[in-house]
Amino acid sequence: MSNNNAAAKVEAVVLNVTDVTAETLAQWDNTSKKIRGLSAMGYTNSQIEKIFITHKVTTKTGSAIRYQHIRNVLITPIGTATK
């Protein structure tokens, strides 16, 4: 089977970052929950970063949420972050 045939048989779900509304983000009360929730919905780290830029989601200090922050949240088990 060629790669073209295999690719044709795979149905991809494309998630659009503009489909996320402020109400969607409001269901989670902190940034980590927003990141985990969007990831669970199927958004990639890059898409989550774009969503946060679009909706002006920032850290407590007011700086933008960057890709590395999103990655760190997703690879750190819940409840084990240092304070």
Image (cartoon, rainbow, N blue to C red):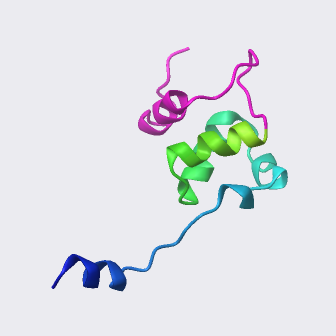
Quadrant housing residue 5: bottom left
Would you place residue 22 above or below residue 63 in this image? below
Would you place residue 18 above or below residue 49 in this image? below
Image quadrant containing the N terminus: bottom left
Residue shown at 62% from the left, 36% from the top: 32
Q: Position of residue 72 (x, y in %)?
A: 47, 30
Residue shown at 73% from the left, 45% from the top: 28
Q: Position of residue 10 (x, y in %)?
A: 37, 79
Quadrant housing residue 41: bottom right
Residue extent of the magenta highlight:
56-83
Indicate left or right for 23 with 74 as reference: right
Residue shown at 71% from the left, 35% from the top: 30
Image quadrant containing the C terminus: top right
Q: Position of residue 77 (x, y in %)?
A: 44, 36
Indicate left or right for 30 with 66 as reference: right
**What secondary structure predominates along the stretch shown in magenta?**
loop
Indicate left or right for 79 with 22 as reference: left
Q: Position of residue 2 (x, y in %)?
A: 18, 81
Indicate left or right for 39 with 55 as reference: left
Q: Residue furthest left?
A: 1
Is residue 77 highlighted in magenta?
yes
Q: How many marks?
A: 0
